[in-house]
Each structure stands twice: as structure tokens, then as C-alpha cells.
Amino acid sequence: SQQGEEDPQALSIQEGENATMNCSYKTSINNLQWYRQNSGRGLVHLILIRSNEREKHSGRLRVTLDTSKKSSSLLITASRAADTASYFCATDERDDKIIFGKGTRLHILP
Amino acid sequence: EPEVTQTPSHQVTQMGQEVILRCVPISNHLYFYWYRQILGQKVEFLVSFYNNEISEKSEIFDDQFSVERPDGSNFTLKIRSTKLEDSAMYFCASRQGRANEQFFGPGTRLTVL
């Protein structure tokens, strides 16, 4: 089965900088979602981008999708300490279950 | 803002015991899911549920697992005879339609001793 794979596995940046995380997947999808998870906590839905969309914004978040390369990126601009978390992409192949990647651990340094 | 809720937040049980994890999905949602995340690993799909029946289940979801929507609001996951390897965070999720976002609950941390 397909799965999203995030890159890098871990990322440390200074507060105020931009953070970019990438996700690659293997098969055709209907949509792709990004989630955030604080350590040991629940999954917070960030954004959904459909296969016919190329870019989507939500506040400081920008998501791109390139279906020809089977990849997506999540950009967090002007990072804050509260952005420290793990970020997961999740692909939706048949509009039912979603498949998660292993995640990128983002650490914002003060 | 509506949200998915789960109880309990933490459940400790002895190996071989039955546990029931409870979820209240968002009220106008029609599709319901259980996922689990073993510590340090990725989130894994267990089962999807729609129109009062299982739509799909993973290999993990064997005969020891069952789901039920006993009334109009609750969605439960039962593990009949827990094993040590069932220790994980269990997440319930729901979505309004098949092409919509899946919203997750805060999770139940299950510890099997």
C-alpha cells in the first residue's frame, strides 16, 4: 500500500525562520492532509489539499502538491516555539482510510 | 468548534482482560475510524465504519477487535483479550463525507501489563 514519507526526519531551526517539510508518496491519491502532533498528544488537522490543487494557504502554513512528482511540501513561515511538534502527511487514496508517514520532528530553537 | 472526544484518556489493564475504548465523533459526521500509534512509531489504520458496518479493516484488526456504534453518538473499540503488544495510543477519527478532512480525537493511551 502507498504511504507518505516525510523528509527530513528531524529539523531544528531558529525561532522566526521558515520551516519546510516534504512528503513523498507512491501511488495516485485523491487528497493529501497534513497533521501536527505534540509529544504524546493527539493529531491536529492542519490542511487538506486535493489532487487537482497545486497550492493552499492557511495562516502561516503553505502546502504545495505536485502530483507528477508524487510529492508535497509544508512550509511554516515565521516559526514560533509553539510550532515545535511532529508533522505528518497522510494520503487518501480512495477517500476512506488515510495512510500516515513517519513524520518530521520539528524543533524551534529560542 | 465541534471536536472528537475520547474516554478514558489513559487505560491500564492486565494482559488477557477486555477493554472498551470510547469515542464521540463530531455529530454530523458519517464516517468513523480507529487508528493506533505504538510509542515512537507511525499512526496505523485499524478500521473504518460507515452506515453501521465495517467498511475496511487492516491486518491488525483481527478477531480480538470489534467496533460498535451502540447509539447515535458513541463509537467504541473493544479488545477482547488484550496482549502486551496492544499497548499503544488509540485514536478515533471521523469525517463528514468521504472526501473531507478526518478529524482526530485526543487519543486513549492503553497500557497492557
Image (cartoon, rainbow, N blue to C red):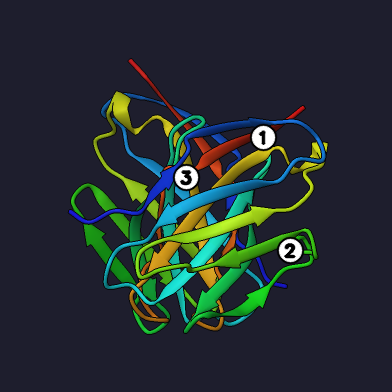
The quarter of the image holding the C terminus of chain A is: top left
Which residue appears at 71% of the width and 46% of the height? B18
Residue A36, position as x, y percentages in the image = 42, 45
- Residue annotated with mark 2: B61
- Residue annotated with mark 3: A87
Residue B37, position as x, y percentages in the image = 63, 45
Q: In whole angstroms, how far apart are the C-alphas of marks 3 and 2? A: 26 Å
Q: Chain of mark 3?
A: A
Residue B76, position as x, y percentages in the image = 53, 58
- Name the amino acid, label 3: Tyr
Which residue appears at 42% of the width and 70% of the height? A65
Q: Nearer the viewer, residue B1 or B11?
A: B11
Classed neighbour count for the residue bearing mark 1: other residues with Cα under 10 Å, few (<14), some (14–19), many (≥20) = few
Instruction: Between label 3 and label 2, give the one nearer the viewer.
Output: 2
Q: In whole angstroms, how far apart are the C-alphas of marks 1 and 3? A: 16 Å
**Side of B77 where B69 appears, left or right:** left
Question: Are discs 3 and 2 located on one and the same chain?
Answer: no
Q: Are marks 1 and 3 in contact (CB under 8 Å)?
A: no
- Is residue A72 depicted above or below B37 in this figure? below
Q: In whole angstroms, how far apart are the C-alphas of marks 2 and 1? A: 18 Å
The image quadrant that residue B35 belongs to is bottom right
- Name the amino acid, label 2: Phe
Question: From where the camera sits, is residue A43 visible?
Answer: no
The quarter of the image holding the N terminus of chain A is: bottom right
- Residue annotated with mark 1: B39
The image quadrant that residue B25 belongs to is bottom left
Q: Chain of mark 1?
A: B
- Name the amino acid, label 1: Leu
Instruction: Between label 1 and label 3, give the one nearer the viewer.
Output: 1
Which residue appears at 27% of the width and 28% of the height? A80
**Side of B23 where B113 appears, left or right:** right
Badge 3 element:
strand
